[in-house]
Amino acid sequence: LKLEQRVLNLKGMVDDAVSSPQAYYNWVTKQVGDITRYKTYWGLAREALKVMGIEWDALSIPESELFYTDEVSMNKIIPFLTYPAEYYTVSLQIDCDDYALWAAADASRIFNLNGIMQAKGYLGDVYHAFNLCVVGEGQYRLWEPNAGFPWAGSLFKIGENGYNVKKWR
């Protein structure tokens, strides 16, 4: 199935099976299974990203410790951090920024990973928000949290698929 259909199927299963935030947490963590979790420091990540030309949006001040996982574990949890395209609602001003925010918040809430960040930049020539994650010391990947986009639900390197990161938070 295409990712969009998998996400809609997942949404249906969640709607049918989950009755509370705790039940959702239990269900998702059971679906994903064990993930490997590492610790580093935001200062190191901030400097590494700065060297790559990606500026920190100083409106947010991260905690000193940064918790992340590897690519194998990220690929297990990304389906739970990718949301149906139908959630995009212009009249309610729900857009790409919201998708990126939801993914970062859910990664922290469900998986205790705060190394998933909102990224802001360009997709081609158009402003866009998406996600940036730490997958190893000095290693970063992007993903698109809106299932309606071609590269949604899979990790890729910075600069690939037309995604150009300028800032993170």
Image (cartoon, helix red, strand yellow):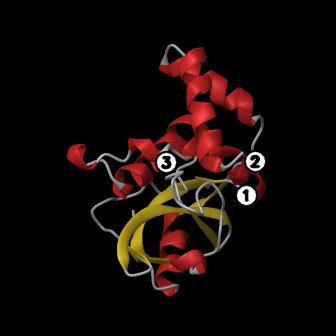
- Please report the residue visible at 54 percent of the width from the left and 51 percent of the height from the top: 147
Amino acid at pointer 2: Thr
Marks 2 and 3, how far apart at CA: 18 Å
Residue 106's x, y, as percent? 50, 40
Mark 1 or mark 2: which comes first in sequence? Answer: 2
- Please report the residue visible at 38 percent of the width from the left and 67 percent of the height from the top: 128
Residue at image mark 1: 70
Q: Secondary structure at mark 1?
A: loop
58 left or right, relative to 43: left
Residue 85's x, y, as percent? 46, 47
Amino acid at pointer 3: Ala
102 left or right, relative to 95: right
Q: Are marks 1 and 2 in contact (CB under 8 Å)?
A: yes
Residue 33 in view of the camera: yes
Residue at image mark 2: 36
What quarter of the picture does the N terminus occupy? top right
Front position in the image: 52 or 31: 31
Residue 61's x, y, as percent? 35, 59
Quarter where residue 79 is shown: top right
Residue at image mark 3: 103
Marks 1 and 2, how far apart at CA: 7 Å
Considering every residue shown, the one lying at the far top of the view is 19
Mark 1 or mark 3: which comes first in sequence? Answer: 1
Few, some or many residues within 10 Å of mark 2 (<14, 14–19, 20+): few
Residue 81's x, y, as percent? 56, 45
